[in-house]
Every structure is written in structure tokens, then in C-alpha cells.
Amino acid sequence: MLCNAYGAMVSYLMIVKETLPSLLGYDDDDEYMGRVTLTVSTLLIIFPLSMQRDMAALAKTSIISVCFDLIMVAVVIIVSPVKQSVAAAGGLA
């Protein structure tokens, strides 16, 4: 169970690190600001949530998170390049 929770935590942190810079309006290539944003968001949002004694309080948040995960998968499937556009760009011929 620890491995599953660790994998989910790492994937959420990767999503936060890739998403927040564009939402906050600074360059995605700025590695220092990416690390600062990840550290601050972890300490201010994720860490306090994980310190609760009773995780049952996070049940509704977990359901919302799963729904957003499904929406994210749907967006990736819809926006991902199709074979014809990749072939037109010279790849996977």
C-alpha cells in the first residue's frame, strides 16, 4: 500500500510542478521557480492535508480528485496527436 500511495504522491507532485508555473505566469524553463513553487505548494497545501488524524475527512476530496483525473485523461486523449498529423510532420512514417 505504501508503494501505491508513494506513486500517487509523486505523480500529483509532477502534475503540480508542470501546471502551476503556467497558471502563475512565469516561464516553464525557470527551474528555480519550479522548485520554489513545488516546495511552497507542498508545504502549504499537501503537507497539512496529510497530517490529519482521520483520513475519512478527505473522502469527498478524493472523489473529486478521481473525477479530475478522469477529466485529465479524457483531455489528453482528445488533444493528443493522431497518426495522420504525426505522419504529416514527418514522424512515425
Image: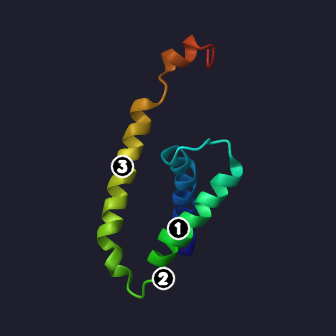
Return the x and y of residue 88 as percentages of the image width and height: 55, 11
Rendering colour mode: rainbow
Q: Which residue is mark 3?
A: 70
- The mark nearer the N terminus, 1 or 3, is 1
* The residue positioned farthest toward the right in the image shown: 32
Identify whether 34 is placed above or below 75.
Answer: below
Q: Which label is found at residue 4?
A: 1
Numbered circles on residues, count: 3
Kindly report the distance in space between the C-alpha atoms of the residues bearing marks 2 and 1.
18 Å
The quadrant where residue 53 appears: bottom left
- Distance, label 1 to label 3, CA atoms, is 18 Å
65 sits to left or right of 80: left
Q: Residues within 10 Å of mark 1 (few under 14, many from 20)?
A: few
Question: Which residue occupies 29% across, 69% down?
Answer: 60
> Which residue is labeled 2 in the image?
51
What amino acid is labelled 2 in the image? Met
Point out the tag, 2 or 1, that comes first from the N-terminus: 1
Q: Secondary structure at mark 2?
A: loop
Please state which of the two labelled residues, at mark 2 or mark 1, is closer to the viewer.
2
Q: CA distance from mark 3 to mark 2?
A: 26 Å
Q: Residue at x 58, y 44 (%)?
A: 26
Residue at the spot x=35%, y=46% of the render? 71
Q: Which is more toward the observer, 70 or 20?
A: 20
Q: In the rendered image of this protein, does residue 64 appear above or below residue 43?
A: above
**Residue 75 percent across, percent down from the top left:** 39, 38
Name the secondary structure under disc 3.
helix
Q: Amino acid at mark 1?
A: Asn
Specify the amino acid type for callout 3.
Answer: Leu
Most foreground residue, 57 or 42: 42
Q: Secondary structure at mark 1?
A: helix
Tag nearer the camera, 1 or 3: 3
